[in-house]
């Protein structure tokens, strides 16, 4: 007989994943297979399990993830198994073991299988990489399959069996009155009872449901809401209800400690007039299917697996409000983007369900038919095991044997990341390095001897490489990062990547075509460009100053008084040259070189005596080339965003935040309706005084 080690949540526990494992075990052909279970849910003890399921059960003795992983690996190592089958376990829970498990499966000749959910709204490269480490990945939603199929070549769809399918059935009106009288004696026959069943956690979003219900309650005094979850958890639901103006009789919570056994749960559904599940995301949503089988109309979020379960068979509420959910990524726990239902839109759906019997009847009929058909087409674990067992060769996506460094934007960040490339090549000796960025920034990287290929930005490429690095996308959280950091930007990347030390900046310096070709000397001249026709004219031989007016966010990083600065610089004996994008605010400089390539700007900057820059690429460029400069800051924190000045001298000018800023400090442009964009608060006289200070520094 073939030996299987299942890994999941306790089969007799109350969770959806535990029920899934229980249903799979009930399918198992015990004449062909002998099963053991490794479980990490402590709600039901192993002795209880043995009384119901004649198999060996290994329980994790710790809630600590690291210890649980070591216990699981020790179990696998000595287990003498033919199949290792994860059931319902989130991808991130054991992801750090996948590569080791895959290698161990090859050495010990067992099959590494994972039946998993994919319940996030985006295609994450780190999750895709984990899935591609699994020899036999099976996703248990059509939504997840459609999302992943192009990135995971050996992916299969698996529709898990349902626990005790025969008990989930509707009752007539008389039966409904009986179960409601039994479970909710305080709810009258003419009152409309909305029901929610699920944990009090961020993903289920129960607090928004309470807010929505409070809106409905104002319209319909006969509405009531029952929540089959604990009042304490991710949200203080009792406090939320009170804050929304609800009274205890309108809002009914599950009694603390009470838990209906599985066989009694259909009665709970049958007592509802409408079932609610406006969660942020769902891998499958067992409760939604259970309600549909019981003939209860369903309102749910138009999200992830709900899309396939309720399209035409229930009421889907738009899921458009941006929020965040605590999940795991490559670097550990993070806040991933998610989308929530608006309470007013939930309330609109509830109102329609209450007043329109035709809608309720349609949802009842179509929902019951859909869920019944869904049950008739569930997958068999025996078929899966036979399919896997007969597989001679695993189809695995070939990874590109190279390093991929990914930086989506912008030019200044890309210049800063060039300090990391040597360290990564030293970390992976013998492997070529490819750099992925947007096409408009590729010129920053031209000629870099450490880069073998520059490719255009495409998220899907990350999981195709053997050594992908995407520090800005996977490590630095969204939000106002860097406002109070203890490191400057130029050191972020190499520190985040745990490199021992950074390399020098690198940018190629290309002489612009419009500059006359002659020997490079200290008094190298420049030539002006007219739009049409182009003409060449010797313009100056004396030291000059680069000026720059507009950074990456024009609304908050534009200095409109540079013409006064240029006039003052001319009086000091310095001609001025404007560098920057073609649409940057005009500086009134002697010579306008806006719109060049980044590498051409580098050549011009390298010849300059001084620079006056805005917090942006050109500030970091001057710093990397050792050109003394004055940098104008506004909403950005100069202590963090200042360039790394590898030569020359640096003066950073920040606004007087106490006098000029309503927020009393740098906001990283988060206050979009600010009445005083603070980059423009600098006086030209202060800038010219700073230039004079740079001159004195050089003379010392």
Image (spheres, rainbow, N blue to C red):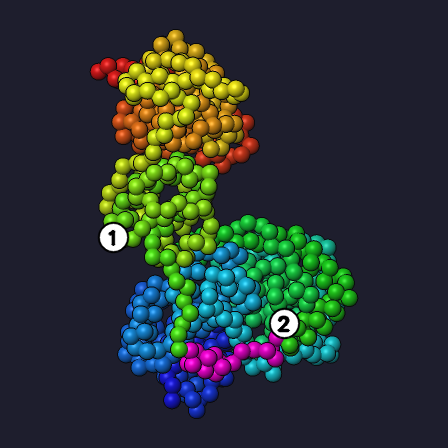
- Is residue 628 depicted above or below 35 in this figure? above
Residue 309 spot, x, y in % from top left: 62, 67
Measure the alpha-carbon separation of dots 1 and 2.
Answer: 57 Å
- Is residue 489 depicted above or below 605 in this figure? below
The residue singled out by tag 1 in the image is 429
Magenta span of residues = 374-391
Q: Is residue 263 left or right of residue 352?
A: left
Please identify the quarter of the rendering in which residue 296 is found.
bottom right
What secondary structure is the stretch in magenta mostly built from? helix
Q: Badge 1: few (under 14), some or many (20 or more) residues near its Cα, within 10 Å?
A: few
Question: Disc 1 or 2, which lies upstream in sequence?
Answer: 2
Query: Residue lying furthest left in this view?
Result: 700
For image coordinates 32% across by 18% down, the residue present is: 524
In terms of depth relative to the viewer, which is nearer, 137 or 438? 438
Badge nearest the viewer, 1 or 2: 1
User: Which element type, helix, strand or loop, lies under badge 2?
Assistant: helix
Q: Does residue 660 appear in this view?
A: no
In terms of depth relative to the viewer, which is nearer, 114 or 103? 103
Q: Is residue 211 left or right of residue 158?
A: right
Q: Is residue 360 left or right of residue 574?
A: right
Please identify the quarter of the rendering in which residue 112 is found.
bottom left
The residue singled out by tag 2 in the image is 291
For image coordinates 43% across by 31% down, the residue present is: 597
In terms of depth relative to the viewer, which is nearer, 515 or 113? 515
- Is residue 439 depicted above or below 88 in this figure? above
The N terminus lies in which quarter of the figure? Answer: bottom left
Residue 55 spot, x, y in % from top left: 39, 85
Q: Badge 2: few (under 14), some or many (20 or more) residues near its Cα, within 10 Å?
A: many
For image coordinates 31% across by 36% down, the residue present is: 506
Q: Does residue 534 appear in this view?
A: yes
């Amino acid at each position: 007989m073939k030996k299987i080690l299942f890994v999941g949540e306790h089969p007799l526990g109350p969770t959806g994943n535990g029920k899934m494992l229980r249903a799979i075990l009930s399918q198992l052909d015990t004449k062909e297979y002998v099963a053991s279970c490794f479980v990490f849910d402590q709600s039901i003890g192993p002795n209880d399990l043995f009384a119901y399921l004649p198999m060996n059960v290994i329980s994790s003795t710790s809630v600590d993830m690291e210890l649980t992983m070591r216990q699981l690996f020790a179990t696998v190592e000595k287990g003498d198994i033919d199949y290792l089958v994860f059931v319902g376990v989130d991808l991130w829970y054991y992801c750090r073991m996948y590569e080791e498990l895959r290698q161990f499966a090859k050495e010990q000749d067992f099959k590494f299988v994972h039946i998993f959910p994919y319940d996030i709204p985006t295609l994450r490269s780190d999750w895709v990489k984990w899935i591609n480490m699994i020899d036999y990945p099976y996703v248990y939603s059509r939504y997840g399959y459609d999302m992943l199929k192009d990135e995971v070549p050996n992916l299969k769809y698996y529709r898990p069996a349902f626990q005790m399918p025969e008990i989930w059935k509707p009752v007539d009106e008389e039966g409904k009155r009986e179960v409601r009288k039994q479970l909710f004696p305080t709810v009258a026959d003419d009152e409309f009872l909305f029901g929610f069943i699920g944990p009090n956690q961020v993903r289920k979003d129960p607090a928004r449901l309470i807010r929505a219900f409070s809106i409905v309650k104002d319209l319909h005094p006969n509405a009531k809401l029952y929540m089959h979850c604990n009042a304490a958890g991710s949200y203080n639901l009792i406090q939320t209800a009170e804050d929304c103006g609800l009274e205890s009789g309108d809002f009914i919570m599950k009694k603390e400690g009470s838990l209906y056994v599985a066989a009694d749960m259909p009665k709970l559904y049958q007592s509802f007039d409408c079932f609610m599940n406006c969660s942020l995301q769902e891998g499958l949503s067992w409760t939604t299917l259970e309600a549909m089988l019981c003939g209860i109309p369903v309102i749910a979020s138009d999200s992830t697996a709900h899309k396939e379960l309720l399209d035409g068979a229930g009421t889907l509420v738009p899921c458009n409000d941006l929020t965040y959910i605590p999940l795991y990524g490559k670097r550990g726990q993070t806040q991933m983007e998610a989308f929530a239902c608006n309470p007013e839109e939930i309330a609109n759906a509830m109102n329609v369900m209450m007043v329109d019997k035709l809608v309720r009847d349609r949802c009842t009929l179509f929902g019951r038919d859909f869920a019944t058909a869904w049950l008739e087409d569930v997958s068999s674990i025996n078929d899966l095991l036979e399919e896997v067992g007969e597989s001679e060769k695993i189809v695995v996506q070939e990874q590109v044997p190279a390093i991929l460094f990914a930086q989506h934007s912008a030019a200044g960040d890309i210049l800063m990341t060039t300090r990391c490339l040597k360290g990564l090549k030293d970390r992976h000796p013998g492997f070529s390095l490819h750099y992925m960025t947007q096409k408009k920034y590729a010129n920053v990287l031209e000629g870099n001897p450490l880069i073998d290929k520059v490719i255009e930005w495409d998220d899907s490429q990350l999981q195709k490489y053997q050594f992908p690095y995407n520090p800005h996308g996977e490590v630095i959280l969204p939000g106002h990062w860097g406002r109070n950091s203890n490191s400057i930007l130029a050191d972020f990347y190499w520190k985040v990547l745990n490199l021992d030390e950074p390399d020098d900046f690198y940018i190629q310096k290309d002489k612009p075509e419009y500059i006359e070709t002659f020997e490079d000397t200290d008094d190298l001249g420049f030539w002006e460009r007219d739009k049409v026709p182009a003409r060449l004219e010797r313009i100056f031989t004396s030291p000059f100053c680069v000026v720059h007016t507009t950074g990456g966010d024009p609304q908050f990083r534009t200095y409109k008084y540079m013409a006064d600065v240029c006039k003052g610089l001319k009086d000091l004996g310095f001609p001025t040259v404007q560098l920057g994008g073609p649409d940057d605010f005009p500086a009134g400089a002697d010579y306008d070189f806006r719109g060049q390539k980044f590498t051409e700007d580098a050549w011009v900057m390298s010849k300059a005596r001084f620079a006056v820059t805005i917090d942006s690429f050109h500030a970091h460029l001057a710093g990397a080339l050792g050109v003394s400069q004055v940098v104008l800051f506004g909403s950005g924190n100069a202590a963090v965003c200042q360039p790394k000045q590898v030569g020359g001298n640096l003066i950073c000018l920040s606004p007087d935040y106490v006098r000029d800023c309503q927020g009393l400090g740098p906001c990283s442009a988060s206050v979009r309706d600010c009445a005083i964009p603070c980059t423009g608060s600098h006086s030209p006289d202060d800038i010219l005084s700073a230039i004079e200070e740079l001159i004195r520094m050089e003379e010392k």
